Amino acid sequence: MQPASAGTESAFHLLDASIRSIRAALRSKEISCHELAQLYLARIAAYDQQGPRLNGVIMVNPAALQEADRVDAALRAGESAQPLLGIPVLVKDQFETRDMPTTFGSALFKDFVPGRDAAVVEKLKAAGALILAKNTMSEYAQPGYYGSAFGFCRNPYDLARSPGGSSCGTGASVAACFGVVGIGEDTGGSIRNPASSNALVGLRPTLGLASRFGMLPGSPTRDTLGPMTRSVADAAILLDVIAGYDPRDPATAFSVGHVPQAYSNFLTPDSLRGKRLGVVRSPLGTGIDPEAKDYQLIKGKLDAALAEMATAGAEILDPAPLDGIVDLLHRVSGGGEAEEAVDSYLADHPNAPVKSLREIVLSPEGLVHPGQRASLAAGLGHATTDLAHLQNQAVRAELRQEVLRLMADHRLDALVYATMDHYQPLIPDDIMSHREPASRSGSNSALSPAIGFPALTVPAGVTEDGFPVGLSFLGRPFSEGLLLSLGYGYEQTGRHRGPPASTPALPGEP
């Protein structure tokens, strides 16, 4: 595609391109899939390992341009029915790809090629998507934004800070426009925290809505996956593709009868009108300092968002009376599942470099980040039959009931809150030798995985310091359509996101 000449303007703009705008540009031959892929690859080359060095991409698909050529041939032949035909997608390196290594962010797995695609990758390809690249991730999906296979990832909105984790590379890369949309994984906040901190839409679906086959597990009663996008509409389209039953992941049997014809059908401009939203004012995470400047700035953005939604017709219950919900949440732990889950996953891969979580923890120095090694070691020696694990499941069941009761008693459609109460931390100089496990201080994302309910974060603007703020909606099981409609309705109230200054349009970029 030739750059727009002086005095003219292309109708296609890469930095704000969406699935629909790209599909229209491909059909009208304003751009080819090959040219589109080249534009994104140029941005990766300019900004990922050069310039600001975001380090959000761990590998580019070596066959990306050849696959783009096949898309162009299909378009010339009149094929255009696939919903993601020609759309370059970024995928967290926690998901298996049959023709590329799957490292989990670890040098130990740098040469591991599983020989199969994860279910989500299968579905993306079947929908016509081009898997453009795989993204860096906090090693083995532990909290953080670093791993022995790649180093550490930066936030494109503030290069001195973390992008959030563990889907750090997907968050930074979608924000920096290295692809159209991305797929992340969420156990305790790993989609929503980096989405919030990179001015993105991030959806953690109901547990069981999307298949986890071919994804490294950590906590099967909490692990799930979902879209990371620059708009709610793109998240809805992506969810249409990845949702549904897969016999290889029995948990998805719960989704049968709960997947609508199209999540996009829920997106109407007046979708906030008449909806009742309960505001969560109590911190849902730990390490919160209500006197801190960033906390106050984020609170100001939350208040502004609530006012915008009220003007758009939403009924706001502020605050929602949480009663004992926060206390119950703080009693929930995440341990007991990791060793069994990882060992079972590795047993399914004869070519894996190790066969157990214990072998990962005991691997030679340099193959696992020391902080992540310590985090993984905490999971050894525990099982799902342990009394502590069973007691934890009982607390989660009680918490689930209390959240449903709160919503029923007050006729709430969703709970709403700031995704993060604090900015992401500054990146320390000793990040690659730091031996303490990372924390999720400042995050309010623990409630959704504790009860298995869906949660959506959407951009709510930036503070006066220029750091992105996320607004979260949490709903009942399989209420993704409703949550997307709420996010879309809020999105229509104003411009709440813009591209990061560190990765501007390249010369000649449309």
Image: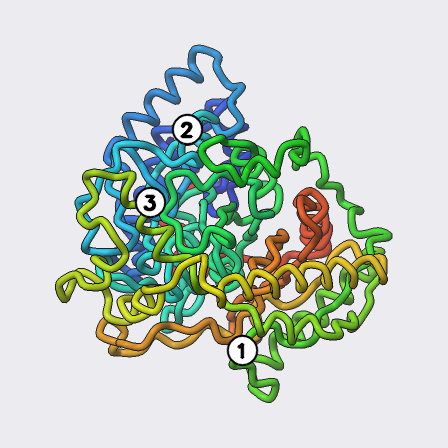
Residue drawn at (31%, 64%), measured in percent from left and top? 146
Residue 471, percent from left and from top: 63, 62
- Residue under circle 3? 345
Q: Residues within 10 Å of mark 2 (few under 14, many from 20)?
A: some
Residue drawn at (42%, 14%), measured in percent from left and top? 76
Residue 333, percent from left and from top: 50, 68
Extreme bottom residue here?
291
- Residue under circle 1? 286
Query: Quadrant of the rendered structure where residue 456 is?
Result: bottom right
Observer able to see residue 461: no
Give the distance between the C-alpha atoms of the residues marked 2 and 3, in whole angstroms.
Answer: 23 Å
Please name the amino acid that badge 1 sits on: Thr
User: Is residue 2 positioned above or below 294 on the image?
Assistant: above
Residue 509, percent from left and from top: 39, 43
Quarter of the image with the C terminus in it: top left
Observer able to see residue 247: yes
Q: Please state which of residues 61 and 53 is positioned toward the viewer in this rendering.
A: 61
Look at the numbered disc 1 and give the secondary structure of its residue.
loop
Look at the numbered disc 2 and give the secondary structure of its residue.
helix
Disc marking residue 459: none
Give the distance between the C-alpha atoms of the residues marked 2 and 1, in whole angstroms.
Answer: 40 Å
User: Is residue 510 positioned above or below 126 on the image?
Assistant: below
Q: Please state which of residues 484 and 333 is positioned toward the viewer in this rendering.
A: 333
Query: Does label 2 or label 3 sit earlier along the sequence?
Result: 2
Q: Residues within 10 Å of mark 3 (few under 14, many from 20)?
A: many
Please name the amino acid that badge 2 sits on: Lys
User: Is residue 394 positioned above or below 42 on the image?
Assistant: below
Residue drawn at (40%, 62%), measured in percent from left and top? 156
Disc marking residue 125: 2
Please name the amino acid that badge 3 sits on: Tyr
Q: Residues within 10 Å of mark 1 (few under 14, many from 20)?
A: some
